[in-house]
Amino acid sequence: MIQNRSDFLAANKGHRFASKGFVLLVHDRKDGDDSLRLGITVTKKIGNAVVRNSMKRRLRSLAREFLADGGKAGADHILIGRIGGIDREYALMREDMRAALSKIANRQFKAIALTKPPTNSEEKNR
């Protein structure tokens, strides 16, 4: 579990996936450790302590259900609660999380595709 402010700030430089109920930040630590870390934050704008704690429970449940299989190894995953998250149906939040994790997989694939070496015709154009 991430608790240091510096880790939350570092994760803000990573990939961001926004939905109506939450925002998912994914930041590759590049420290050689394959463990997956989770951080959850819900601001006072969401509501009083009861509402914030309820939102945190929903986000922890989503993380437990999806991050073990769909999360990126060696990365920090930050879930930020949004105002609409407490009223949003849990089934819709599950679909949002599934979509966000599939976008992570697609971005990893695109990053690999962009780093391949240039072909001979591209070298001639330089």
Image (cartoon, rainbow, N blue to C red):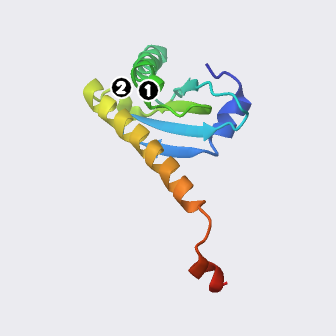
Q: In this rendering, does residue 16 appear at all?
A: yes
Q: Mark 1: which amino acid?
A: Asp
Which one is nearer the viewer's eye here, 122 or 54? 122
Residue 97 spot, x, y in % from top left: 38, 33
Q: Amino acid at mark 2?
A: Ile
Q: Residue at x 26, y 27 (%)?
A: 91
Residue 74 vertical position relative to residue 113 in the rendered view, above or below: above
**Quadrant of residue 19 in the image?**
top left
Q: Position of residue 101 (x, y in %)?
A: 42, 38
Quick check: 88 left or right of 110?
A: left
State the CA–CA distance, disc 2 to disc 1. Answer: 25 Å
**Visible residue check, residue 19:** no
- Mark 2 crowdedness (10 Å alpha carbons): few <14, some 14-19, many ≥20: many
Q: Residue furthest front?
A: 120
Q: Which mark is residue 31?
A: none
Q: Nearer the viewer, residue 86 or 59?
A: 59
- Seen at 44% across and 13% down, the residue is 50
Looking at marks 2 and 1 on the same chain, the residue that comes earlier in the sequence is marked by 1
Residue ID for mark 1: 69
Q: Secondary structure at mark 2?
A: loop
Residue 65 quadrant: top left
For residue 47, above or below residue 123: above
Q: Which residue is located at x 37 percent, y 30 percent?
A: 85
